[in-house]
Structure formats: structure tokens, C-alpha cells
Image (cartoon, grey):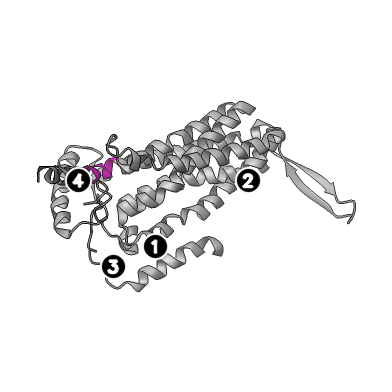
Amino acid sequence: MVLLALPLIIPACSSCSHVDTDGPNPASPLNHDDPHKPLLISNNHQMESNAMVQKPMEHQTQGNCCGTIVGKGHLAALGEEHSAKKLIRCVDFWLYYTAYFCGATVGLVYSNNLGQIAQSLQQQSQLTMLLAVYSSCSFFGRLLSALPDILHRKVSLARTGWLAAALVPMPMAFFLMWNQQDAITLVAGTALVGLSSGFIFAAAVSVTSELFGPNSVGVNHNILITNIPLGSFLYGQIAAMVYDGNGQKITVMDNSTGIVDTMIVCMGMKCYSTTFFLWACITFLGLASSIVLFIRTKPAYGAAASRSSCKHLHQVSS
């Protein structure tokens, strides 16, 4: 438990070292339109963008039964700096944290248990191929995380929308493996989990920078990834409890030392069927959280895109 708490020490110390964290930090929206322009723009543009964003958000949340969740405490503009104390009070951060905790971290735990999963399903001969499939798909998922930057002129989708889209294959894969556990399904599910988790791992830094400020991205991202050891412990315990509950104790003796050891071995679909179902439900929760995050941050991305378009038209006309 002490090791699980260690990732929280550095962000906590950093937040304590800043005495001005209670006040609002200067925010500078990001400029993604022109690579030759500075990444941050002036505070005058920020004030204008804040006014542009707040009005549509107020209009959207009126008469909406989910307005408290979707509209309250939304981001005023992209790139607004968040200190550690301000970050942990931000609703959008916890939606983002939940999406990561219930998404990519589950995929990481799945890869750690892939050897035992293959053994219990009597697919030991396919273990090397399964590991290769997961590694390859995770790599291609990381490459696909560049699509928001490549297609930002053609596809007007917020980066949080891409994050939500990347989480869609995860619950599908686990529901598929829960329903049918043969060699083909295991390979297909492993590929989907690898693609999804790889995309999220690579895109997370950019999302953190855009939502909570580029200057604080180091500390803020370290706070975000505290979910990895916590999730690994929790999801690993779930898998271990289901495995041990369905396994049988066998006694093994080492001929060289004469030491007798007892171990639990589980074979068949029952070993991970319940685990796959629970992981599917957890990743579905992560998907729902990412969708809410996308809805809440969409006006901020829209305001940034409109501002970039106006600047581009002004440059063309001049």
C-alpha cells in the first residue's frame, strides 16, 4: 500500500510549494491552426474567447436535466493553466481520470494477465502470437493518436471526442471475449484492446496539455497516471479472486529440494469469464465518462476553432 501511495507524493509536494494556487492562474488558449504561430496567444484573446464560450454553455445547459453534470464548472478556454490544487477541484479532470482509469489501465492489466489467460483457455501455443498481436496493435494505436493533428482541418472533432472514440473498442472486446472464448475471439479481442489502450496512452499527454495548460502538464499528467498503479492493483485483484475461486489446489514437490508447495490452477472458460464481464462493465463506464467529457469540452474546442478561422480569414484578406 505504501508503494501505491508513492505516485501521489510528488504532485502533493509540488502543490504545497505554490502559495498562489488558490487564485486563478493566467490562461492562454492554444493555437493549433498555424504551426508557424506561437503556441500560446495573448490574454486579450483569452478574455474574448471566455466570453464566447460561456454564452453558448449557459444556453445549452438551460432546460437540460443533466445540466448540472454537463455544464457546471466547465473549462472556459483551452490551455487554461491549472495548478495541482485547482486540478483536483475540476470536474473535467475527474471525468478524464475516470476515462483513463476505466479504459487504458484495464487494457494494461489485460496484457499483464495475457499469459495466464492463454494457459487457462489451453492456448499456450498461441501465447507468442497473442503477445505479438497486442504489441503490434498497441504500436499502431499510438500512431493513430496523431490523427487529430493530421485531420484537424478536415474533421472538426475535439481531441476529447477522439479519446471517446478510442474507448469504444475496449468494452466491445471484453464483451466479445466474455461471450465466446476461442482462439479467433481471443486474437480479435487482444487486437482491439491493444489498439484502444495504445491510442489513449499516446494521446493522454496532448489532452492533458490542452485541457489543463501546457506549462503545468508535467505535474498534472503525473497526477493523472496515479490511476495506473491503483488500477493495476484493483483489476489484478479482481482477476485473481475470480481465478482462485474457480481453480483447484494441487500439490507440487521439488525433487531436488524436497519442498512441497501448494498452488491453484484453473482451466476452462470459467477462469476469466466473470473477469471479462466485469472489465467490460468497467470500460463501459470509462466510455460514458469520456463522452460526458467530450460534451463538456466541445464548446471550448469550438471557440478555439472559430478563433483560428477568423485569424486565418483576416490574414488572407490583409
Observer-side mark, 2 or 4, equals 4
Is the magenta region chiefly helix, strand or loop?
helix
Q: Which residue is mark 3?
A: 21
How far apart are the two marked residues, 3 and 2, measured between alpha carbons? Answer: 42 Å
Mark 2 / mark 4, whichever is N-terminal? 2
Q: Position of residue 285 (x, y in %)?
A: 42, 40
Mark 2 / mark 1, whichever is N-terminal? 1
Mark 1 / mark 4, whichever is N-terminal? 1
Q: Which mark is residue 18?
A: none
Q: What residue is at 55 percent from the left and 63 percent from the top?
A: 3
How crowded pointer 2 is (Cα within 10 Å; few <14, some 14-19, many 20+) is rated as some
Q: Which residues are magenta?
A: 295-307
- The kind of residue tagged 1 is Val
How far apart are the two marked residues, 2 and 1, measured between alpha carbons? Answer: 33 Å
* Pointer 2 with pointer 1, Cβ within 8 A: no
Observer-side mark, 3 or 1, equals 1
* Pointer 3 with pointer 4, Cβ within 8 A: no
Q: Which mark is residue 308?
A: 4
- The kind of residue tagged 4 is Ser
Q: Which mark is residue 240?
A: 2
Asked whether the viewer can see residue 261, the reply is yes
* Secondary structure found at label 2: helix
Q: Position of residue 159 (x, y in %)?
A: 33, 43
Asked whether the viewer can see residue 279, the reply is no
- Across the whole image, how many numbered discs are drawn on residues? 4
Q: Which residue is mark 1?
A: 219
